[in-house]
Image (cartoon, rainbow, N blue to C red):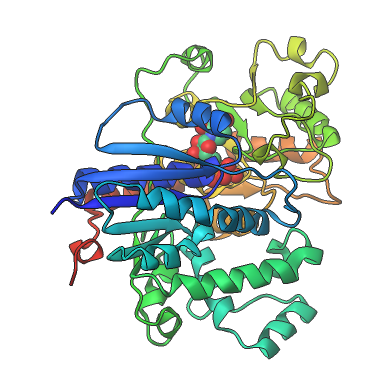
């Protein structure tokens, strides 16, 4: 019998990257004979161009297909989580017919956390093993399944007090993770649905490892903590699922980095979706200019009301030129110390470069993991979704990052200068660098060991 695995990723590079990496791992190490990955997107050509930048080799046993959604006329308001969950709901009929068209029919199905509704499609189609991949932390999985287990009264208390949520065996989650409290009830309903669906899977893979989240991972197994909430569904840490840097990649940023001293450059990027306001873009520019540290900055067009605006580019509108929003003369004044890249840069290769010494990051989980596997300390600047939780983890628990203070809605240039100096020059920063290098070793160990039990793919 030929074992065919099908994996489905919700929109966004933050989901596509780990799903593709898991797919490759299943093919190479776990006796699947063929893997098909479906990437759900509202813009195939944009997704293709980004994926093409991250995945170059071809393998006939590893097939990537796109599921194109037409979102025009749809109400996709709300938080990013509700938006993406709605898009995955819209994609269900296409996912169903795409799977039905596969030859041979798959016996293994994996979908990321935002697409758990597709588990019932996989069941209906008789797929033997159904799994969820959590593309973010185990802590976020804990929050999601725990919220689904709470009764109405407890949830109401949490909502009205806006207090922290105490999850058994895990760090408490502050209410301030919520980006927009007015959307919280809707987001909560989606989270609860997802949490309830997760425990209908045969297993849950999480893009994490013991070195990063030991307590939370243990808590899922512990009958005194999250064990009962998981109802026997095994949680398997499979991280870090990151795309390895391509050693021979040619890119002008890498040529520039070749000319800089070791660990001297601060890399600044807010992931695939992050957008700053115009005012914040100017403040960041002045902050970078005044530190006199070398930098590479991936600049996006600003957005005034949605920090995740770069995730969905409205093609019907004229796109703004990001460099037009930089302060007058900035590029000339920083010519000797900085490099500005429009929209997209080869992040893995930049972080793997020995000249890179710090990473100003929005703390998307993939960026966090990529920073760790390359031993680069961070300046945590969370923008949306669960990024505040990730920022807390890297700054307070793992102590591999300094966290910026958002003050009254804007991170001031003085704060940016202070944080960059802290990470790049001060004793505190040295400690963070040592800590992240230690953590990198645990990532390497985890990668050597990760062997997903064969029961995940075969009939017990
Ligand atoms: N990425 C990249 N170049 C960029 C921006 C992002 O290669 O200019 C990649 C990054 O390496 C990571 C992914 O896109 O693998 C972004 O995922 P993350 O979870 O960090 O953030 P998200 O985009 O989901 O907010």
Res 12 → quadrant: top right
- Residue at the extreme left: 1
Judge by depth and name the residue closer to the eye, 72 or 278: 72
Relative to 287, say whether 200 is above or below: below
The residue at the point 34 percent across, 68 percent down is 203
Q: Is residue 429 left or right of residue 445?
A: right
Give the number of callouts.
Answer: 0
Q: Is residue 377 left or right of residue 208?
A: right
The residue at the point 52 percent across, 26 percent down is 49
Relative to 106, say whether 282 is above or below: above
Picture coordinates of residue 367, whole percent (x, y): 52, 42
* Image quadrant, ligand 1: top right
Relative to 6, say whether 456 is above or below: below
Picture coordinates of residue 148, whole percent (x, y): 56, 78
Residue 347 visible in the picture: no
Judge by depth and name the residue closer to the eye, 313 or 379: 313
Q: Is residue 316 left or right of residue 359?
A: right
Q: Is residue 303 left or right of residue 158?
A: right
Judge by depth and name the residue closer to the eye, 411 or 108: 108
Res 147 → quadrant: bottom right
The residue at the point 72 percent across, 30 percent down is 315
Picture coordinates of residue 331, whole percent (x, y): 74, 13
Picture coordinates of residue 129, whole percent (x, y): 29, 65
Which image quadrant: the C terminus?
bottom left
Which image quadrant: the N terminus?
bottom left
Res 191 → quadrant: bottom right
Residue 406 visible in the picture: yes
């Amino acid at each position: 019998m030929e074992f065919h695995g099908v994996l489905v990723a919700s929109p966004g590079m933050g989901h596509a990257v780990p799903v593709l990496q898991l797919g490759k791992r299943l093919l190479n190490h776990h006796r699947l004979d063929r893997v098909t990955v479906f990437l759900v997107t509202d813009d195939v050509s944009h997704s293709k161009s980004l994926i093409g930048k991250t995945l170059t080799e071809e393998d006939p046993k590893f097939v990537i297909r796109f599921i194109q959604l037409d979102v025009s006329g749809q109400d996709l308001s709300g938080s990013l989580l509700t938006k993406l969950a709605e898009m995955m709901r819209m994609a269900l009929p296409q996912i169903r017919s795409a799977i039905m068209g596969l030859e041979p029919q798959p016996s293994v199905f994996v979908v990321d956390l935002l697409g758990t509704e597709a588990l019932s499609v996989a069941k209906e189609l008789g797929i033997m093993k159904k799994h969820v991949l959590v593309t973010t932390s185990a802590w976020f999985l804990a929050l999601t399944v725990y919220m689904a287990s709470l009764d109405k009264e407890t949830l109401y208390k949490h909502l009205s007090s806006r207090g922290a949520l105490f999850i058994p065996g895990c760090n408490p989650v502050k209410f301030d993770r919520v980006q927009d409290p007015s959307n919280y009830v809707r987001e909560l309903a989606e989270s609860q649905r997802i949490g309830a669906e997760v425990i209908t899977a045969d297993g849950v893979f999480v893009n994490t490892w013991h070195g990063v989240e030991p307590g939370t991972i243990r808590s899922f197994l512990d009958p005194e903590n999250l064990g009962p909430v998981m109802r026997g569904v095994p949680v398997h840490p499979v991280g870090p699922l990151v795309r390895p840097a391509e050693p021979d990649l040619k890119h002008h940023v890498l040529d520039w980095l070749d000319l800089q001293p070791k660990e001297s450059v601060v890399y600044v990027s807010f992931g695939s979706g992050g957008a700053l306001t115009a005012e914040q873009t100017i403040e960041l520019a002045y902050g970078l200019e005044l530190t006199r540290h070398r930098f590479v900055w991936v600049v996006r067009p600003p957005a005034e009301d949605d920090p995740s605006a770069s995730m969905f580019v409205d093609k019907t509108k004229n796109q703004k030129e990001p460099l037009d929003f930089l302060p007058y003369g900035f590029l000339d004044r920083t010519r000797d110390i900085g490099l500005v890249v429009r929209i997209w840069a080869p992040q893995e290769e930049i972080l793997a470069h020995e000249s890179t010494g710090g990473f100003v990051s929005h703390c998307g989980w993939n960026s966090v993991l990529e920073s760790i596997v390359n031993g680069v300390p961070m300046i945590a600047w969370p923008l949306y979704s669960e990024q505040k939780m990730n920022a807390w983890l890297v700054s307070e628990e793992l102590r591999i990052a300094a966290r910026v203070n958002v003050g009254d809605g804007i991170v001031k240039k003085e704060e940016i200068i202070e944080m960059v100096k802290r990470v790049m020059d001060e004793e505190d920063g040295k400690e963070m660098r040592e800590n992240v290098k230690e953590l990198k070793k645990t990532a390497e160990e985890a990668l050597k060991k990760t062997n997903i039990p064969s029961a995940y793919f075969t009939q017990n």
